[in-house]
Image (cartoon, helix red, strand yellow):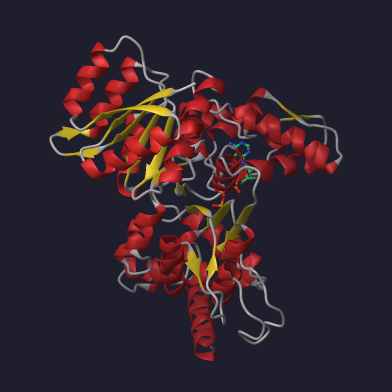
Amino acid sequence: MARDVWVLDDDSSIRWVLERAFTGAGWTPVMFADPHAFLDALKNAESAPDLVLTDVRMPGIDGMEILKELRSTWAQLPVVVMTAHSDLASAVNAFKGGAFEYLPKPFDLDDVIAVAQRAVKSRTQDAPSNKVQPSQTGIIGESPAMQEVFRAIGRLSRSSVTVLLTGATGTGKELVARALHQHSPRSDKPFVALNMAAIPSELIESELFGHEKGAFTGALQRRDGRFQQANGGTLFLDEIGDMPLAVQTRLLRALAEGQFYPVGSHQLATVDVRVIAATHIDLRKAIAEGHFREDLYHRLNVIHVRLPSLTERRSDIPALTEHFLQQASVDLQMPAKRLTKAALAALEQAEWPGNVRQLENLCRWITVMASGDWVDVDELPELTTSEPQTDDWQQGLYAYLRREIRADAQDIFTQVQDEVERLAIEVALQETGGHRQRAAEILGWGRNTLTRKIQRLTDKNVAK
Ligand SMILES: Nc1ncnc2c1ncn2[C@@H]1O[C@H](COP(=O)(O)OP(=O)(O)OP(=O)(O)O)[C@@H](O)[C@H]1O
């Protein structure tokens, strides 16, 4: 059965090739050069076409308006947007909730027909809304902030677009990356994750791109990198802000060209990989400080999904707690603990610098440590309940500790303790204009203790 497709593009050569491609594939195309004529046709048509294919950047009209018009006229009509990467985020937003596909410009004609067919097919199979349900992802969250995340997963579910996930540590970035993959056309292909913070920086390049035998000391075998392993699927680059600049340059090239040279190799490797990157740091700041390439940032930030911190969605704490207590009881083969109302209220009011992961760990702790089946406030470990902090030193410390532990560092507690002491002394002395007696009082030490500690830290520095 011939399908009707309306094509809107102001570029006559694009119209020409698209008309031929669609006719050749058995469709009935109706071509529009002028957005206003298109909108008129839209208003006056008695029935919807099977598909609309439109550019969003045309002179004299805001393409987003066209999407909104389409959405309000025929809510279920599948729409394919032809757009450059830079316009995609706004296009997705303008078309919130509708069936949506996109074609990055410039495109291949075979892709056009494939995407068009997929868009039409998805409509016939589709539920009215393309919001992904929490139960389909294993991600818990009824709060409005999380609903926004589920909607984003749904909207992106038929595309392979690059996504940047931001959010503090432990907010579920990896979980969401996996959900994006599971709900993408690539779901039957591998999902491969690489955490920049977890591997020594000098190995990141070969981890990503693979290496030849003998490419560097210790490269005893040729090895595929994560890019090759993820071929056809999704590569999740966690803590992208920790990627060394030189590797950023290589990544940028690999993303732009879909090709790269493995370390020590002269043979180009070609891959088709969707990249999802995540960061808990502010990449704009990293760019300003010269640690992150701006062009790479734009490449990765085609679609941005921000994960809310746990304190932004306190209403999810009871469901998360119940889930983690259940899970801990299964994992640890211990009876499931229950929280009294007061204990749950305390959790709902706590600060959670480590976000969901911290809550998950706490539930494991309770499962092992609490004595009875019911756990009351006094059995909870100490929770910070103060007002939200303006600074995020605990988060920084948390991330630092995790990075060190994953890098197999030794003796980190002493290091951290020394650093805390040094900072506290430094600030106290600065704030008191170098007055040791006052500084000691502020720090809660005797003057002699302060002098001894200063001496010890100075000796340590000298010894370094
Ligand atoms: N909404 C959620 N529902 C259920 N579990 C969650 C949710 N969010 C996070 N988790 C769990 O919390 C833990 C931390 O999540 P995840 O590793 O995805 O966080 P992250 O943001 O990637 O952290 P980091 O930045 O520190 O790498 C995981 O065990 C994950 O399964």
Q: Is residue 226 in sight in this rendering?
A: yes
Q: Farthest residue to the bottom: give it.
A: 463
Q: Is residue 131 in sight in this rendering?
A: no
Q: Quadrant of ligand 1?
A: top right
- In the image, is residue 139 above or below residue 392? above
Viewer-proximal residue, 360 or 195? 195
- In the image, is residue 339 above or below residue 278? above
Viewer-proximal residue, 212 or 47? 47
**At which x and y percent is residue 227?**
57, 62
Q: Based on the displayed image, in which of its 4 quarters is residue 299 positioned?
A: bottom left
- In the image, is residue 404 above or below residue 53? below
**At which x and y percent is residue 189?**
64, 48
**At which x and y percent is residue 13?**
24, 44
Q: Farthest residue to the left: give it.
A: 60
Q: Could you tell whether 86 is left or right of 317 in the image?
A: left
- In the image, is residue 439 above or below residue 364? below
Residue at the location (43% across, 23% down)?
3
Q: Could you tell whether 354 is left or right of 222 in the image?
A: left
